[in-house]
Image (cartoon, grey):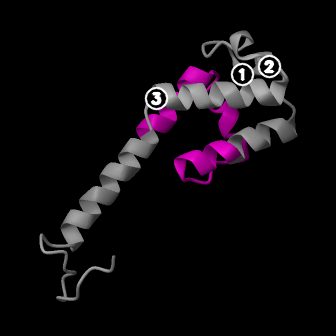
Amino acid sequence: MKKEELESWITRCVAKEAGLRLHEIDAEAPLVTYMLNGFQSFRVVADLGAIVGQRLPESFLYARPTIAQLAEHLTEQVGRKRSWAASIQKIYIGPLGRIADGRSFPE
């Protein structure tokens, strides 16, 4: 997922939880500006984790103070994870799709 797509998704989610319109959300403004309560923050984090395929800590929403910073951090994190997974696959699975002991890789 691209940073812009993730930023747009987070913006929509924060707007929904805060009861605001999209144009009222500034990706560069501190998230505390939108006064999400604990339950609303938890829902944003849970949904965000589902989108990126990772379980995120409940405090994640405030680890980076703005929507733009959150999106950038997650884009980098997901990119590293995918790059790592691709590297592992190249190491353990040969060009013919076989695991080191000769079995075919399950599809």
Q: Residues within 10 Å of mark 3 (few under 14, many from 20)?
A: some
Q: Is residue 43 magenta?
A: no
Q: Which element carries disc 3, helix, strand or loop?
A: helix
Q: What amino acid is found at the position of numbered circle 1 in the picture?
A: Leu
Query: Which residue in the protein does label 3 denote?
Result: 3
Start and end of the magenta stretch?
A: 47-76
Residue underneath mark 2: 34
Q: Nearer the viewer, mark 2 or mark 3?
A: 3
Asked if the residue under mark 1 is in contact with the one under mark 2, i.e. CB atoms within 8 Å, the reply is yes
Helix, strand or loop for disc 1: helix
- Under mark 3, the amino acid is Lys
Instruction: Return the residue at label 1.
Output: 31
Of residues 9 and 72, the one nearer the viewer is 9
- Tell me the residue at 37%/45% (across/down): 80
**Marks 2 and 3, how far apart at CA:** 21 Å
Mark 3–mark 1 distance (CA, rounded to whole Å): 17 Å
Which of the two residues, 11 or 55, is positioned nearer the viewer here?
11
Q: Is residue 10 above or below residue 91?
A: above
Residue lying at the far left of the rendered structure: 95
